[in-house]
Image (cartoon, helix red, strand yellow):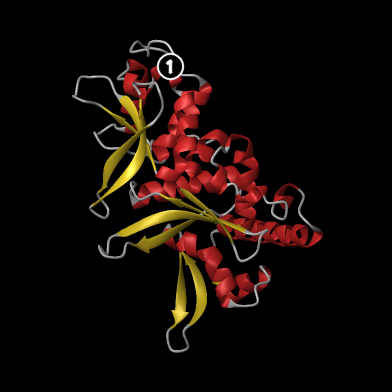
Amino acid sequence: MGRPTHELKILTECQINALTGSMLGDGGLYKQKEHTNPKLVIHRTLKDKEYLEYEASIFKEFTAPRFENGVGKYTKLDERYNKYYSVWKYETVDTPSFSSYHKYWYPNGQKEVPNDLKLNGQIVAHWICDDGWVGKNKVDYRFQIDISTDGFTKDEVYFLSKLMSDRYNENIFVQPWTRKGTGKKYYKLRAYDSACRAIIVDVDDHFKMKRKRLWDNPISRYYTNPPERQIERNNITAQKKIIMDDFLKAGVDTLYSELSDRMQFKTDAGLSRWLKPLIEKNIIYTFYDRVNKIPLTIKFK
């Protein structure tokens, strides 16, 4: 492998993308002391050794000497549950090559989502491999993707939701959840169906974690060639988005039933799912008939 470089070296585009995805997920840049250079450290569950070896290959010229012969097996404390687990570990040498990225991600000593963060397919692929869950939504050709963001604040998660929604022109929702045992509240990202397909097309070439590639199933791979029924549903969803965008641009309070009819929802629950992220972002609120528990008016804040 050769001697690892402690000297300043400009990272390649592939390395920057992999590092960014890892920082959104399981990776960390750590300093032994305040004035030392940082090193990259990544932990993986025992079943993901092969993927960690792939990550290590990206940063091979920075690999710490004790990992030159491969990733190592260690015991790690999971502070969320106060339990120790066996994990695979990889780390680099301390190097000034990571110094600017440490400042970028740890401006106040703790990891923060940079407010000028930009995403691309490789970054999102690494992020989902780290902290994503890819599952089938009832049938083989419908997906759901959840991305855990436990280490970030509520505002940071909503910022990431907007980044993802803008990139894929789809609704990427923020899903609150409470950890059992501690009662602590967290937020994660969630994508359904058409949003999942947009993500999959973007990350496919960069996605190297085999166990999460559920879309490789021949029944599921129609995301690049959807059947007529799905094309029709996508067109209906696209039309709903246009109506919602027009409503938001106008900024005029309206009757709940009127907007529901325009978007051709059969129940209040259909429109409610579209309004939920807007309510959570304090853009709008709904006025209810408290006696009959019926939404009456949508008002802008």
Callout 1: helix, strand or loop?
A: helix
Q: Amino acid at mark 1?
A: Glu
Whether residue 92 is visible to the viewer of this picture, yes or no, is: yes
**Residue located farthest toward the bottom when viewing the structure as drawn:** 291
Quadrant of res 98: top left
Q: Nearer the viewer, residue 165 or 222?
A: 222
Residue at image position (59%, 71%) is 270
Residue at image position (72%, 62%) is 233
Q: Position of residue 274 (x, y in %)?
A: 55, 64
Q: Nearer the viewer, residue 89 or 173?
A: 89
The relative height of residue 31 versus residue 6 in the rendered view (above or below) is below
Q: State left or right for residue 270 relative to residue 62.
A: right
The relative height of residue 145 versus residue 267 in the rendered view (above or below) is above
Quadrant of res 28: top left
From the image, tell me which residue sits under label 1.
61
Q: State left or right for residue 216 relative to residue 15.
A: right
Q: Position of residue 222 (x, y in %)?
A: 73, 51
Q: Residues within 10 Å of mark 1 (few under 14, many from 20)?
A: some
Where, quadrant-wise, is the N terminus in this rendering? top left
Where, quadrant-wise, is the C terminus in this rendering? bottom left
Q: Position of residue 187 (x, y in %)?
A: 38, 56
Q: Position of residue 6 (x, y in %)?
A: 33, 13
**Residue located farthest toward the right when viewing the structure as drawn:** 228
